[in-house]
Image (cartoon, rainbow, N blue to C red):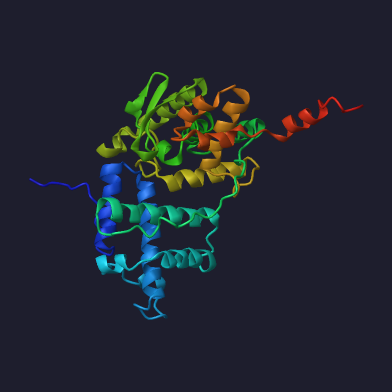
């Protein structure tokens, strides 16, 4: 009998990095996207340190620096200065902005906390005093109600039912890209949809009439191809032209195509911006309170949701006009 182990093992990575990634996936329930991000950040960190500390020739291709030999002694020798040197490298040689560097700091903090608290490899955690780059809060980029309607009305082409359904769900439900791609037909029950969100947490999404109609129209087309689907993909709601579950890149490209066709800036608006749009429209027109919006979007902390409480320029303009000192 064959057994499949649900573990991560990359022979090109240090053993303790593999163990950390497995811990995130099997114990913490961390999403695959986050795990992949941590792996990328920490692999870059180890390659930088080997170059920085003179363990490899300076003219070696950075991506070719081997890191599978990193052991406990190497890890124990890492100090706060090494960490800041890496963050500086990310900024000056990788052109990482504040968001990218903040993510690297988060990756380092999580990894070294694991080494110290869980794996018991380190006597002290060098990231305790590591500061996160300050990130200036920005209002989310979103489509107006008129732009959203224009986008939906412009959708056409051989996959118009599928694409219309995808963009309708983005704009009405505020789904994440990974959540949309993972939708299974069996999880659609009347006006509810059960999805696995960030951190492998299950949540219920409520479908309005626009979503239900779009799904119904798309299924009428999709089900004609049911015999062409592999068993593993038969339950997938959204199917690619290759008769497989649609992937994130395909969705990104189709959103970009329709955004451009509708006359909007295809560089400015992405699937995540459509999620912003749904949240903003619900808050602005639906009188949705912040706690309800938090549950709809699947945010762990309400502070994340609060970015949608911004007011638009028209409200500010009206507020100024209503000042009692204003004279006509």
Left or right: 165 as drawn, with respect to 199 = right
Residue 71 appears in the rendering = no
On screen, residue 252 above or below 109: above
Can you give x and y, in whole percent of width and height, for residue 309 in the image? 60, 32
Does the image show residue 140? yes
Q: Which image quadrant is residue 50 in? A: bottom left
| Residue that appears at 54% across and 32% down | 171
User: Percent position (x, y) of residue 255?
Assistant: 53, 42
> Is 14 placed left or right of 309 in the picture?
left
Residue 232 versus residue 135: which sits nearer the camera? 135
Of the pair 234 and 22, the residue shown nearer to us: 22
Q: Position of residue 215 (x, y in %)?
A: 44, 27
In the rendered view, tell whether residue 83 sits above or below residue 194. below
Task: Please give the name of the residue rendered at 55% of the width and 37% of the height, measured from the top-left corner.
Answer: 276
Residue with the most extreme right position: 328
Residue at image position (44%, 24%) is: 216
**Along the line of sight, the residue nearer the viewer: 73 or 22:** 73
- Which quadrant holds the N terminus? top left
Which quadrant holds the C terminus?
top right
Name the side, left or right, on which 324 lies relative to 295. Answer: right
Rendering coords of residue 157 (x, y %): 53, 39
Query: Of all residues shown, which one is farthest toward the left?
Result: 1
> Closer to the camera, 214 or 276?
276
Q: How many marks?
A: 0
Q: Quadrant of residue 270?
A: top right
């Amino acid at each position: 009998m064959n057994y499949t182990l649900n573990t991560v093992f990359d022979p090109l990575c240090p053993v303790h990095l593999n163990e950390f990634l497995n811990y995130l996936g099997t114990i913490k329930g961390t999403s695959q996207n986050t795990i992949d991000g941590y792996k990328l950040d920490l692999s870059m960190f180890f390659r930088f340190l080997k170059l920085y500390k003179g363990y490899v020739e300076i003219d070696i291709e950075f991506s070719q620096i081997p890191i599978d030999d990193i052991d406990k002694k190497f890890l124990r020798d890492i100090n706060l200065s090494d960490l800041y040197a890496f963050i500086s490298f990310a900024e000056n040689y990788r052109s990482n902005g504040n968001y990218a560097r903040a993510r690297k700091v988060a990756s380092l903090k999580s990894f070294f906390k694991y080494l110290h608290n869980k794996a018991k490899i380190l006597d002290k955690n060098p990231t305790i005093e590591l500061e996160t780059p300050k990130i200036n809060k920005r209002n989310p980029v979103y489509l107006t109600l008129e732009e959203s309607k224009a986008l939906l009305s412009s959708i056409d082409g051989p996959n118009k039912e599928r694409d219309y359904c995808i963009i309708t769900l983005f704009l009405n439900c505020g789904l994440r890209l990974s959540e949309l791609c993972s939708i299974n037909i069996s999880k659609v029950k009347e006006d509810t949809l059960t999805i696995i969100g960030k951190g492998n947490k299950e949540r219920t999404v409520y479908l309005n009439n626009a979503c239900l109609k779009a799904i119904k129209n798309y299924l009428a087309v999709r089900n004609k191809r049911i015999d062409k689907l592999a068993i593993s993909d038969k339950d997938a709601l959204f199917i690619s032209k290759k008769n497989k579950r649609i992937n994130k890149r395909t969705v990104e490209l189709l959103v970009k195509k329709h955004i451009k066709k509708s006359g909007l800036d295809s560089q400015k608006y992405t699937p995540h911006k459509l999620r912003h749009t749904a949240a903003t429209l619900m808050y602005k027109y639906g009188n949705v309170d912040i706690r309800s919006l938090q549950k709809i979007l699947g945010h762990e902390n309400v502070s994340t949701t609060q970015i949608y409480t911004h007011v638009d320029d028209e409200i500010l303009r009206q507020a100024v006009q209503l000042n009692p000192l204003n004279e006509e």
